[in-house]
Image (cartoon, helix red, strand yellow):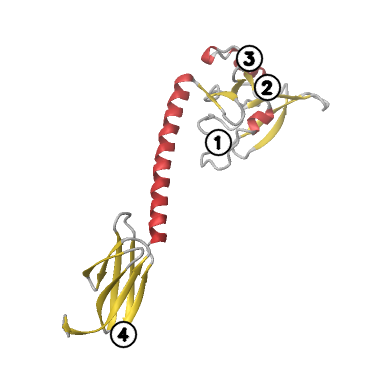
Amino acid sequence: LPHGGRSVATRLLIYADAPCRVEVNGEEKGQAGEGGSLKVGAELGQNVVKATSLDAGGAWQKVVEVKGFGQVVVNVELAKDIAERKQAAAQAVAAQRQHAIAAQQLELAQQRGYWTDPSTGLMWAMTDNGSDVDWKEADSYCRAFGVGGYSDWRLAKIGELEGLYDASRGVDYRIKWPLTVTACCPWSSSIDVTSSEWAVSFFDFRVGKRYRSPLDLAHYTPRALCVRRSGG
């Protein structure tokens, strides 16, 4: 029989692994889905079969070659695409929620002036002192640091500073978010008394390495980043 200027030569038997609307050569033919099939007329040559999910936005398309009379089975595979779309949507929602939580945490930390690292329980000043100081000045700065009403702030041990290094951060000074430093290298409280002269350690957040400096080397002036143990 004539059909759009071409003769109907066969039928397509369409199965789908998810409920969907089916088009053949741009014409809507009905619905297919789990547990059933859809039979539609087809033409000799190429037939474009398109399926669109009824509820999840998935889409599938295939060119089916009809070479003669009979029945051609077409399997529409939408379930994987639907699952991937749902997963992507869930991930986007989770990312938005995480972003909102992070924004709230940052605002609260900025208001308080300190942030508690959940992985260590250490409470850190949000940033360093903002200017060059020698080790003794850095030590005095943190002992006098009174943010949050606490009086037990101190210089961090070198291992504690090392624990703040985050190589994944795309900033000059790779310190854990939401902390910032205004220069590369905060002093630590760690003192080496085994060498011929006392030396103190500092940590470089550009490269994630610790260094030592003689205690009396006054011209070398990193910064002071204060810490305390939360719950004290």
Please name the residue that numbered disc 4 is placed on: 70
Q: CA distance from mark 2 to mark 4?
A: 93 Å
Q: Position of residue 81 (x, y in %)?
A: 39, 60
Name the residue rendered at 41%, 55% in the picture: 83
Q: Quadrant of residue 111?
A: top left
Q: Which SS class for mark 1?
A: loop
Q: CA distance from mark 1 to mark 2?
A: 23 Å
Q: Secondary structure at mark 4?
A: strand
Residue most extreme to the bottom:
68
Mark 4 and 3 residues: CB-CB less than 8 Å, in contact?
no
Counting residues from the N terminus, which is met first, the one under dot 2 or under dot 3? 3
Q: Judge whether 147 appears above or below 13 on screen.
A: above
Rendered residue at 53%/40% (across/down): 169
Callout 1 environment at 10 Å: few (<14), some (14 to 19), or many (20+)? Answer: many
Judge by depth and name the residue closer to the eye, 93 or 56: 56
Q: Residue at x 65, y 26 (%)?
A: 187
Q: Quadrant of the N terminus?
A: bottom left
From the image, state whether disc 4 or disc 3 is nearer to you. Answer: 4
Q: Split into 4 quadrants, where in the image is the C terminus? A: top right
Splitting the image into 4 quarters, where does residue 24 fall?
bottom left
Q: Amino acid at mark 1?
A: Tyr
Q: Earlier in the sequence, mark 1 or mark 2?
A: 1
Image location of residue 167, percent across then percent down: 58, 41
Which residue does the image show at 33% across and 69% down from the upper left? 61
Q: Amino acid at mark 3?
A: Ser
Query: 80 or 202, which is in the foreground?
Result: 80
Left or right: residue 169 versus residue 10 is right
In the figure, is residue 88 to the left or right of 199?
A: left
